[in-house]
């Protein structure tokens, strides 16, 4: 009988949000930092990626991504988390800001 290989565990996604996870609106006001291979990470939300200049662009299928696009949208983990933390307070949903969502949640109103 051969031994079973030891499984490996690695994180592949971080959720970044200014709203607490218990807030019903947190999923809408969150973005993700996701592993994309080769020790590089992307800041993503609704199928788009944040680039190094702070602009969102659609993330096409892998075979359509140019090297220039990848260079602007893939980061080391620390950089990706920094970019995500800077972007999180600026998210809006249907015209509501993060501040609106936080204020409404303390008032008991839904966004």
Image (cartoon, grey):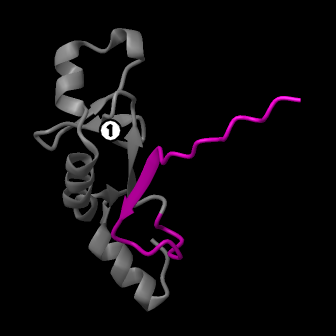
* Image location (x, y in percent) of residue 35: 40, 38
Q: What residue sits 21% from the left and 14% below the top? A: 67
Asked if residue 56 lies in the magenta stretch, the reply is: no
Q: What residue sits 19% from the left and 59% below the top? A: 86
Asked if residue 3 lies in the magenta stretch, the reply is: yes
Q: What residue sits 44% from the left and 75% below the top? A: 20
Which contiguous range is marked in magenta? 1-26
Up the image or down, 68 lies above or below 19; here it is: above
Question: Magenta region's main secondary structure?
Answer: loop
Q: Residue furthest right?
A: 1
Up the image or down, 87 lies above or below 9; here it is: below
User: In the figure, is residue 111 to the left or right of 95?
Assistant: right
Q: What residue sits 53% from the left and 76% below the top? A: 22
User: In the figure, is residue 15 to the left or right of 81?
Assistant: right
Task: Write down the quadrant of residue 50 in the picture.
Answer: top left
* Image location (x, y in percent) of residue 89: 24, 65
């Amino acid at each position: 009988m051969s031994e079973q290989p030891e499984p490996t565990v690695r994180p592949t996604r971080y959720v970044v949000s200014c709203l607490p996870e218990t807030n019903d609106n947190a999923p809408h006001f969150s973005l993700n930092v996701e592993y994309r291979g080769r020790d590089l990470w992307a800041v993503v939300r609704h199928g788009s990626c944040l680039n190094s200049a702070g602009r969102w662009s659609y993330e096409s299928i892998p075979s359509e991504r140019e090297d220039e696009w990848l260079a602007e949208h893939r980061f080391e983990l620390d950089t990706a988390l920094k970019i995500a933390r800077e972007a999180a307070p600026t998210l809006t949903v249907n015209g509501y800001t993060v501040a609106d969502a936080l204020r409404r949640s303390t008032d008991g109103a839904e966004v």
